[in-house]
Image (cartoon, rainbow, N blue to C red):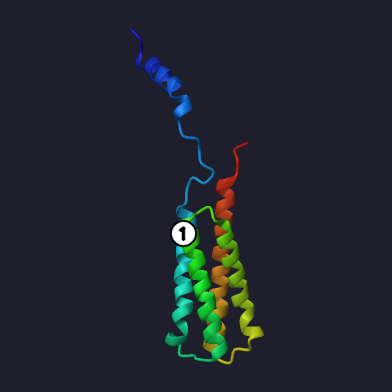
Amino acid sequence: MRSTRNRVEERDARYADRRPVRPEYTDATEARSLAGINFILGIWLIISPWILNYFTTEARWDQFATGIAIAVLALIRYAIPRASWASWLAGLAGIWMIIAPFILNYTKTAAFWNEIIVGIVVAVLAFANVQTYSRYNRTPA
């Protein structure tokens, strides 16, 4: 009479070639969480000129366009966790938001600080999201 252990080992040997190979990206939860936060920040940038009451043309349109870009890139990253290029572009958009108030000479303090603070948060989250991909994409030694 065969022991249970022997039967399990025989079964494992029989189906060894049918086991799924470990995908290169095993856990998308962290990437999706960071992308979700960036999506919310992108929506905030779109609506913030109306909430914070600043309607200077350069601040309003810059934050509106950058907010749409960040929201779309975050949705792409959420839907396709392996699309690390979307996080790179969102990080660059965050850097643009940090320097834009100086280049475009924002006159309203609310617009100035809103863009800098949100830009820092977006850039940090986006570049951290790039790291989640590279951490899961490594081949085992």
Q: Locate residue 107: give its quadrant.
A: bottom right
Which residue is drawn at the image coordinates 53% and 71% (left, top)?
A: 69
Q: Label 1: how many residues lie within 10 Å, few (<14), some (14-19) or many (20+)?
A: many
- For the N terminus, the quadrant is top left
Q: Nearer the viewer, residue 45 or 64?
A: 64
- Name the element at disc 1: helix
Q: Position of residue 33 (x, y in %)?
A: 45, 59
Q: Is residue 117 above or below residue 24?
A: below
- For the C terminus, the quadrant is top right
Q: Is residue 38 above or below residue 79?
A: below
Q: Position of residue 17 (x, y in %)?
A: 48, 26
Q: Locate residue 126: give its quadrant.
A: bottom right
Count of marks overlaid on the render: 1
Q: Position of residue 43 (x, y in %)?
A: 45, 74
Q: 1 left or right of 23?
A: left
Q: Is residue 125 above or below residue 51?
A: above
Q: Nearer the viewer, residue 69 or 102?
A: 69
Q: Is residue 11 above or below residue 128?
A: above
Q: Which residue in the protein does label 1 denote?
A: 78
Which residue is drawn at the image coordinates 59% and 51% (left, top)?
A: 134
Type of amino acid at the residue the image marks with label 1: Tyr
Which residue is drawn at the image coordinates 52% and 70% (left, top)?
A: 70
Q: Nearer the viewer, residue 102 or 109?
A: 102
